[in-house]
Image (cartoon, helix red, strand yellow):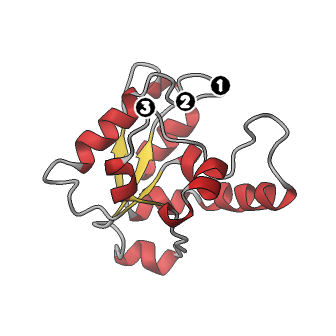
């Protein structure tokens, strides 16, 4: 997950992919384990936010930075001030970008995370970045249903 203050103060137009953040901003990443008990108890529901959104292009989730602007608006709102960590797929899971660059360890981590992503939407605050295409995609519908 990403430190929310890192996102609040990030000066770029779009958030980098996970591997770039890991390399250039390692202190911005926090490893958090969610299990069923933590989810059911709502342990992280006030301090962790998961973002449900669609990728605007197949290889770029937020090319114009509009999603990052919306995330920052929420984080700086009264309701978002208490958020300490953020989960956003492209910035928190090892991506295969550019194609073929994901290591075997990254691939293993990605598959494990993907199999347990439902815990995020069940046990954290969920920010849905809704647009017309959001409602036509399986993953976004699944995420919003879990939230």
Between 100 and 28, the one nearer to me in the picture: 28
Q: Which residue is depicted at the point 55% across and 71% down? A: 31
Q: Residue furthest left?
A: 78
Q: Do residues under tags 2 and 1 come within 8 Å of each other at their CB atoms? A: yes
According to the image, label 1 marks what residue?
Answer: 58
Q: What percent of the width, then of the height, locates residue 61?
A: 54, 31
Image quadrant of residue 22? bottom right
Q: Which mark is residue 99?
A: none
Label 1, residues with CA under 10 Å away: few <14, some 14-19, many ≥20: few
Name the mark nearer the viewer: 2 or 3. 3
Q: Which mark is residue 55?
A: 2
The vertical placement of 128 against 134, above or below, is below
User: Label 1 to label 3, Cα distance in Å?
Assistant: 18 Å
Q: Which residue is depicted at the point 35% across and 76% down? A: 43
The vertical placement of 122 against 35, above or below, is above
Q: Which mark is residue 13?
A: 3
Q: Do residues under tags 2 and 3 come within 8 Å of each other at their CB atoms? A: no
Q: Of the two numbered discs 2 and 3 on the same chain, state the one appearing first in sequence.
A: 3
Q: What percent of the width, then of the height, locates residue 62?
A: 49, 29
Q: Is residue 107 left or right of residue 60?
A: right
Regarding mark 1 in the picture, which secondary structure is present there?
Answer: loop
Image quadrant of residue 129? top left
Q: What percent of the width, then of the height, locates residue 67?
A: 39, 32
Q: Which residue is depicted at the point 67% across and 58% down? A: 115
Regarding mark 3 in the picture, which secondary structure is present there?
Answer: loop
Q: Which residue is depicted at the point 55% across and 48% down? A: 91
């Amino acid at each position: 997950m990403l430190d929310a203050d890192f996102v609040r103060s990030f000066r770029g137009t779009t958030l980098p992919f996970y591997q770039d953040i890991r390399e250039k901003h390692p202190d911005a990443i926090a490893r958090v384990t969610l299990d069923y008990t933590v989810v059911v108890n709502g342990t992280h529901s006030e301090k962790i936010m998961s973002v449900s959104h669609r990728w605007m292009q197949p290889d770029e989730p937020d090319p114009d930075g509009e999603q990052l602007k919306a995330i920052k608006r929420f984080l700086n709102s009264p309701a978002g001030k208490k958020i300490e960590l953020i989960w956003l797929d492209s910035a928190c899971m090892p991506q295969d970008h550019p194609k073929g660059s994901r290591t075997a360890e990254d691939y293993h981590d990605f598959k494990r995370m993907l199999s347990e992503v439902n815990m995020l939407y069940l046990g954290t605050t969920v920010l849905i970045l809704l647009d017309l295409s959001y409602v036509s995609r399986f993953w976004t519908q699944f995420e919003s249903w879990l939230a």
